[in-house]
Amino acid sequence: MGNTKSSALSKELLEELKSNTKYSEAELCTWYQSFLKECPSGKISKEQFEGIYASFFPGADPSAYARHVFRSFDTNADGTLDFKEYIVALHLTSGGKTLQKLEWAFALYDVDGNGTISKSEIQEIVRSIFNMIPAEDQKKLPEDENTPEKRAEKIWAFFGKKENDKITEGEFIQGVMDNKDILRLIQYDEPQRIKDKLKEKKQ
């Protein structure tokens, strides 16, 4: 790695990202170069982010899910993702420690950002996940979770909540940690496909 481009990434940010993610210095510098190539302004807009997701899922409609993912990572709510937010997003959606991933998953499901999750919020995210599952694959899902409504119902029932109850972050994290089946139900688990696509782009 030459220092010409990588010097544009500040030492402080580089150290912070190295300690908070699983990426090496060389990887981060490569990411940064391709990030600047795609986004010369140093920021990704919501539309650009949706475009990136669309290229990962050509046979589906990931726009709603991409919007929710974008919202959950736009930590300063300025309508764009900077390089740091982008790398943290990549790290958490394709790896990350379980607790970090669950804190992010809670933020994803907490659509209105009020600190709790309602049944309608679970339905909204599950619907956006279903938009990304090809129709053929949907047919292979178990009978009790082969529609967004059924899957949302199954998640809600697991937490033992009444129709208008709310789930707090603590309950959410504990519940998912105690039951791996729920972890499978709440996430769109195809990070490998995204990682493979990113590797292709880097080559």
Image (spheres, helix red, strand yellow):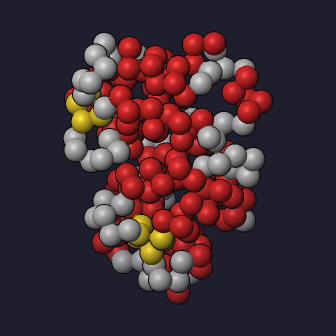
**Count of number-bearing discs:** 0
Residue closest to the eye, 31 or 38: 38
Task: Please name the residue shown 45% across and 19% down the image.
Answer: 153
Looking at the rendered image, the quarter that the N terminus falls into is: bottom right
User: Can residue 34 be seen in this snapshot?
Assistant: yes
Task: Please name the residue shown 27% across and 24% down the image.
Answer: 164
Q: Which picture quadrant has residue 175? A: top left
Question: Where 188 sits versus 164, above or below?
Answer: below
Looking at the rendered image, the quarter that the C terminus falls into is: bottom right
Residue closest to the eye, 128 or 35: 128
Q: Is residue 157 left or right of residue 194?
A: left
Q: Residue 143, how many percent across, how many down? A: 63, 12
Q: Residue 5, how many percent across, how many down? A: 52, 83
Task: Please name the residue shown 57% across and 53% down the image.
Answer: 63
Q: Residue 36, how many percent across, how many down? A: 53, 78
User: Can residue 199 be seen in this snapshot?
Assistant: no
Question: Where 88 sits versus 127, above or below?
Answer: below
Residue most toward the front? 164
Question: Where 140 sits versus 110, above or below?
Answer: above
Task: Please name the residue shown 36% across and 77% down the image.
Answer: 10
Q: Which picture quadrant has residue 37? A: bottom right
Q: Is residue 156 left or right of residue 38?
A: left
Q: Residue 80, how many percent across, how many down? A: 41, 69
Residue most toward the bottom? 4
